Image: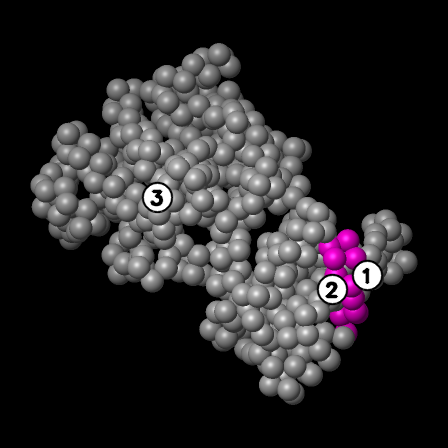
C-alpha cells in the first residue's frame, strides 16, 4: 500500500461523485515475461490509475467500483502453494482489499459474471483505454469490444474524472516526487562526474540505471544518454565519448511508490563548453529560466511555450541563424526547425502523466486545443491553464538535425526566416536541452527537489572539474 487507507477511500468516493452512475472497472497490470513464461526480466509495474485508487502493488488484480450501489470490490486469485514455494507467502486478495478500505473480494472467474449481469441490465460500464495487449484481450473477452475499437469505446466520463483528480498533486504525492528528485540528482551528478573522452555512452547509462534501481523502484523511463543530442530519444550506444562533443543526459528515477522524476542536462565531454556551445546553451538557459518566472496558476502553458519560441527566435537572429519578423516566424513555425517538441508535460505517477488517457485529454482543454497540422506544434503535450498542485516539466531545447535541415532547405520551408547558409555550419553541433520538474504553487512555481542538479554552464564545469 502506498498511502493511508483513508487516502484511497477518499479517492474512490470522489471518483463516484464525478462519474455519477454505472460500473467502473479498473484493470491492474500482469507480470510481463521476457523470452519464456517464467523469466520476468521486466520488473513488475502496476497500472498507475489502478494504483491511484486501489494502492495495491500485486499483479493480476482488477478493481470494481459500483457507483449506483456505492460498493467496491477487489477481484483476483490468491496464489497457490506452488507459487509460495518459489516466490514466498503473500497476503490474500481479501487482506489486500481490507488494507485500502475495500470490504469485498472475489476470484477472477467472477469478473465475467459481474460484467454479464451489468450488460444484461444495460448498465454503463466505464473502463479506460487499455495500453497492454493482454488487457485488451481481457476487455474483448469480457465486454465483446474489439481491441481496435477500445480507445473509442472507453469512457470519456471516467477519463475526465481521472484527469481532474490526478492532475492536482496532494502533499503526500509531492513528498514522493521530492524523493524521486533526490534519486534523480544522484543519477545526473554521477553522469556528470563520469563524462570524459573514451568512456562509452552505454557505460554511463548503465551506471545511472543502477542508481535508479538501487535507491528506488526503478528508472522512470529508459535513459537517453548520447552525443547525438539532436535525436529526441537517442538511445545510448557503444560509441566512445569524444573530445569537443556534447553529451545529453535525459533520465529520471521512480520511487518505490512509483512517483517519478525527469530531468535533462547537456554537458561538454571535455569538461569545458566551447564558445559556440556556450552561445547556444545560453539561449536554452534563458528560455528555461524565463518559464520559471511565467508559470503560475491561470497561465496557459501554451503561452509559455510560444513565449519560449519568440525568445529563442530573437536570440537565434542575433547569432545570424534566423531572420525576419519574430511574430511571423513563430506563427509560421520556423522555430520548430530548432525545437520540434513542446515545452513540457505533466509529471506524477507516470513520467508523462496519464498519457495513456490520450494527451489531448490530459494536456489541453477546449480553449487550448493544439494545432495538429503544424510541425512542432503538433508535438505540444501541455497547453492548458496551470493550476496550483500541477507538476510539469520545463524543457526547452535547441537541436541541429541534419536531415531536417536538409529537408527544409531543399523544399524552401520557412526560407524567409531561416539563414540556411549559417545553419549548415552547425550540422555537426548536436543538441542541447535543459529540463526540470516544477510544482505550480499558489503564486508561482518552484523546482521539485531540494538539491538542484547544476545547469548553469559554470556550475556544470565546476562539478566536472571537481570530479576529475
Q: Secondary structure at mark 3?
A: loop
Q: How many marks?
A: 3
The spot of residue 371 in percent (x, y) is 27, 58
Front label number (3 vs 2): 2
Q: Earlier in the sequence, mark 3 or mark 1?
A: 1
Q: Is residue 104 magenta?
A: yes
Residue 130 vs 1, above or below: the answer is below
Q: Earlier in the sequence, mark 1 or mark 2?
A: 2
Q: Is residue 168 magenta?
A: no
For mark 2, what is the residue? 74
Q: Secondary structure at mark 2?
A: strand
Q: Earlier in the sequence, mark 3 or mark 2?
A: 2
Q: Are marks 1 and 2 in contact (CB under 8 Å)?
A: yes
* Distance between the alpha carbons at the discs numbered 3 and 2: 39 Å
Residue 458 vs 135, above or below: the answer is above
Residue found 83% across the figure and 52% down from its top: 90
Residue found 77% across the figure and 59% down from its top: 97
Q: Secondary structure at mark 1?
A: helix
For mark 1, what is the residue? 94
For mark 3, what is the residue? 343
The spot of residue 80 in percent (x, y) is 87, 61
* Distance between the alpha carbons at the discs numbered 1 and 2: 8 Å
* Distance between the alpha carbons at the discs numbered 3 and 1: 45 Å
Mark drawn on residue 172? none
The spot of residue 399 in percent (x, y) is 30, 38
Region of the chain picked out in magenta, as a range: 98-109
Question: From this viewpoint, is residue 341 visible?
Answer: no
Determine crowd level at label 2: few under 14, some 14-19, many 20+ residues with C-alpha closer than 10 A.
many
Amino acid at each position: 500500500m502506498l498511502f493511508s487507507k483513508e487516502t484511497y477511500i477518499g479517492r474512490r468516493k470522489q471518483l463516484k461523485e464525478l462519474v455519477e452512475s454505472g460500473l467502473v472497472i479498473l484493470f491492474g497490470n500482469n507480470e510481463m515475461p521476457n523470452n519464456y513464461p517464467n523469466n520476468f526480466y521486466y520488473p513488475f509495474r502496476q497500472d498507475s490509475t489502478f494504483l491511484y485508487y486501489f494502492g495495491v502493488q500485486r499483479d493480476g488484480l482488477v478493481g470494481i467500483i459500483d457507483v449506483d450501489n456505492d460498493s467496491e470490490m477487489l477481484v483476483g486469485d490468491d496464489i497457490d502453494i506452488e507459487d509460495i514455494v518459489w516466490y514466498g507467502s503473500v497476503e490474500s486478495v481479501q487482506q489486500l482489499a481490507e488494507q485500502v478500505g475495500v470490504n469485498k473480494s472475489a476470484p477472477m472467474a467472477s469478473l465475467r459474471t459481474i460484467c454479464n449481469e451489468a450488460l444484461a441490465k444495460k448498465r454503463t460500464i466505464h473502463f479506460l483505454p487499455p495500453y497492454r495487449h493482454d488487457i485488451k484481450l481481457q476487455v474483448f473477452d469480457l465486454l465483446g469490444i474489439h481491441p481496435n475499437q477500445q480507445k473509442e469505446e472507453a469512457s470519456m466520463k471516467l477519463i475526465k474524472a481521472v484527469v481532474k483528480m490526478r492532475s492536482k498533486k496532494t502533499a503526500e504525492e509531492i513528498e514522493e516526487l521530492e524523493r524521486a528528485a533526490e534519486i534523480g540528482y544522484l543519477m545526473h551528478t554521477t553522469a556528470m562526474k563520469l563524462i570524459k573522452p573514451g568512456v562509452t555512452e552505454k557505460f554511463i547509462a548503465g551506471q545511472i540505471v543502477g542508481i535508479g534501481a538501487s535507491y528506488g523502484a526503478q528508472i522512470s523511463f529508459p535513459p537517453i544518454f548520447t552525443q547525438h543530442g539532436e535525436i529526441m530519444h537517442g538511445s545510448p550506444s557503444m560509441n566512445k565519448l569524444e573530445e569537443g562533443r556534447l553529451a545529453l543526459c535525459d533520465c529520471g528515477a521512480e520511487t518505490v511508490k512509483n512517483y517519478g522524476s525527469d530531468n535533462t542536462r547537456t554537458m561538454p565531454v571535455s569538461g569545458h563548453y566551447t564558445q559556440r556551445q556556450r552561445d547556444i546553451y545560453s539561449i536554452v538557459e534563458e528560455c528555461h529560466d524565463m518559464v520559471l518566472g511565467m508559470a503560475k496558476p491561470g497561465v496557459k502553458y501554451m503561452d509559455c511555450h510560444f513565449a519560449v519560441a519568440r525568445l529563442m527566435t530573437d536570440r537565434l537572429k542575433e547569432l545570424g541563424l534566423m531572420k525576419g519578423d519574430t511574430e511571423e516566424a513563430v506563427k509560421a513555425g520556423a522555430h520548430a526547425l530548432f525545437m520540434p517538441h513542446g515545452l513540457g508535460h505533466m509529471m506524477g505517477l507516470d513520467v508523462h502523466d496519464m498519457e495513456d488517457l490520450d494527451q489531448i485529454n490530459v494536456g489541453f482543454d477546449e480553449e487550448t486545443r493544439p494545432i495538429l497540422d503544424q510541425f512542432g506544434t503538433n508535438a505540444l503535450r501541455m497547453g492548458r491553464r496551470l493550476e496550483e498542485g500541477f507538476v510539469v516539466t520545463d524543457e526547452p531545447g535547441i537541436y541541429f538535425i541534419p536531415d531536417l535541415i536538409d529537408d527544409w532547405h531543399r523544399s524552401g520551408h520557412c526560407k524567409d526566416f531561416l539563414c540556411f547558409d549559417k545553419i549548415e555550419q552547425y550540422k555537426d553541433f548536436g543538441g542541447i536541452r535543459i529540463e526540470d520538474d516544477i510544482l505550480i504553487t499558489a503564486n508561482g512555481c518552484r523546482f521539485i527537489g531540494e538539491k538542484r542538479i547544476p545547469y548553469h554552464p559554470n556550475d556544470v564545469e565546476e562539478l566536472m572539474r571537481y570530479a576529475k
